[in-house]
Structure formats: structure tokens, C-alpha cells
Image (spheres, grey):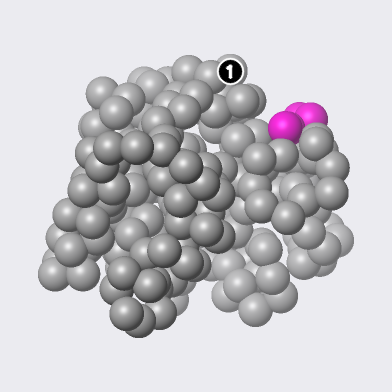
Amino acid sequence: MGATADALTELEREIDAPGDGMDRLRLVRIPFVPEVRLHLAEDAIVWWARMEADAGHALPAPYWASVWAGGQALARHLLDHPELVAGRRVLDLAAGSGLVAIAAALAGAERVIANDIDPYAVAAVTVNARANRVRVTATGDDLLDAVPDEVDLLVAGDVLYDATMAARMLPFLCRTAATGTDVLVGDPGRGHLPPGLLAAVASYPVPTTEPAVDSPVRRVQVLRPC
């Protein structure tokens, strides 16, 4: 709780700080999910560099400070299909900014838990849920070696971003689905998904806002285990 509490204090201080610029956080509407507003970095790399300089030590990469294509597609899918979440218990895995968790809450979920191992992401979920006036419980445990209980729907946006993470994530998703829990994954096709493991249920052209991309739009699929 100490690391998360410290991160929350830092983010609240950043949000309340006067001024603007490339190294600031701003509350903005999300291009593909305008129902949701998030505190995001104007430039996540510049913000990260300043925060590390201020702290005097390395900090986790602020993945939560950008909005990723997989999360945008999954959040859009939940809001457009509220029957998937209404009255259900939802777990947003590797939640980052909390976009998908917030969308689930807006779509009528009974309970939403957003999980991420980065204390700053847990803090970001807290401030972003507050900004959208929804209730989301944020946790920082590593869940990938177990199977979540008391969950009706597990959602995960952009979690197959490298081969190492995919090797841990895919068995977890399949184990979870085998218990009867519904699983939905938002994936922009980063090349780490073996064929035949997940099946597409929807596809979206999503505006790209994350750093270092070479196209203004990415085709993102919403997938579930076969």
C-alpha cells in the first residue's frame, strides 16, 4: 500500500499543478471512446523523464499515461454491447489507465476490479475513476499464476505486447476461460498471438494515440478463447 499511496499522492499533485506543456498530465476525452475522460500525459516520454529526474531514480514506464488501441477497442465494444457486462462482476487485467474498467462500470457492471502491477497505474485508475464518477476497485497484485474467482467477465486490452508477456498471459487467459468465466481481449495484432488460440468477435478501426506509431489508425480485434 505504501508504493501505491505514494504514487497516488504524486499523481494528485501532478493533476493539480498549474501550467501546461509536454511534461504535464491533462484530463482529455478519448478519441474512440468519448464517453470517458482520462488523465494522460501530453507526451509520456517527456513526462517520464521529468518524473525520474525529480525522483532521482528509475520509475516504471508509464504505460498508463497513454491510451492504447487495444483498450480503446475493448472499451468501445463494452459500451456498445452493455449486455456483456450489465449486472456482472468484471476484472480488467493489466488495466493501465483504467479505460476498460471505467467503460465496464459505465455499461452497468455490478462490480469492477482493475488490476495492474504498476503502483502508478493503480493510482491512475483511482483518479480516472473519480474523474468519470464511477466506482472501480484498483489492485496491484500479480494474478497470472492463479485463476481469478468471483469474476464473470475478464477483460484485457493490449496485453500481448511482447513475446515474454504473451507467454505468461495466454495460458492465464485460457485457464480462466476453462473455469467458465467469459474472457475478452483487445489486440491490435502485434504478432505475438499463435493462430487458432483466440477467435475474433469484433474488429474496429481505432485512432492511434500511443507514442511511436507510424499510422493514424490501427485495426484492432476483440477476441475470445476458442
Q: Is residue 100 above or below residue 5?
A: above
Q: Nearer the viewer, residue 22 or 195?
A: 22
Residue 31 in which image quadrant: top right
* Residue 16 at x, y percent in the picture: 23, 39
Magenta-tinted stretch: 203-207
- Please state which of residues 191 and 86 is positioned toward the viewer in this rendering: 191
> Label 1 is placed on what type of residue?
Asp
Q: In the rendered view, tell whether residue 189 sits above or below residue 109.
A: below
Is residue 155 rendered to the left or right of residue 1?
right
Residue linked to disc 1: 80
Q: Which residue occupies 26% across, 23% down?
A: 133
Figure quadrant of the N terminus:
bottom left
Q: Is residue 21 found left or right of 88 in the rendered image? A: right
x and y, in percent, of residue 29 in the image: 50, 24
Residue 53 quadrant: bottom left
Disc 1 is placed on an element classified as helix
| Location of residue 79 in the rendering, given as x and y in whole percent from the top left corner | 52, 21
Report x, y in % for residue 60.
43, 71
- Magenta stretch: dominant secondary structure: strand
User: Within 10 Å of the Cα at label 1, are there few (<14), some (14-19), or many (20+) other Cα atoms?
Assistant: few
| Residue 85 in view (yes/no) | no
Residue drawn at (46%, 56%), measured in percent from left and top?
A: 47
Q: Nearer the viewer, residue 172 or 21?
A: 21
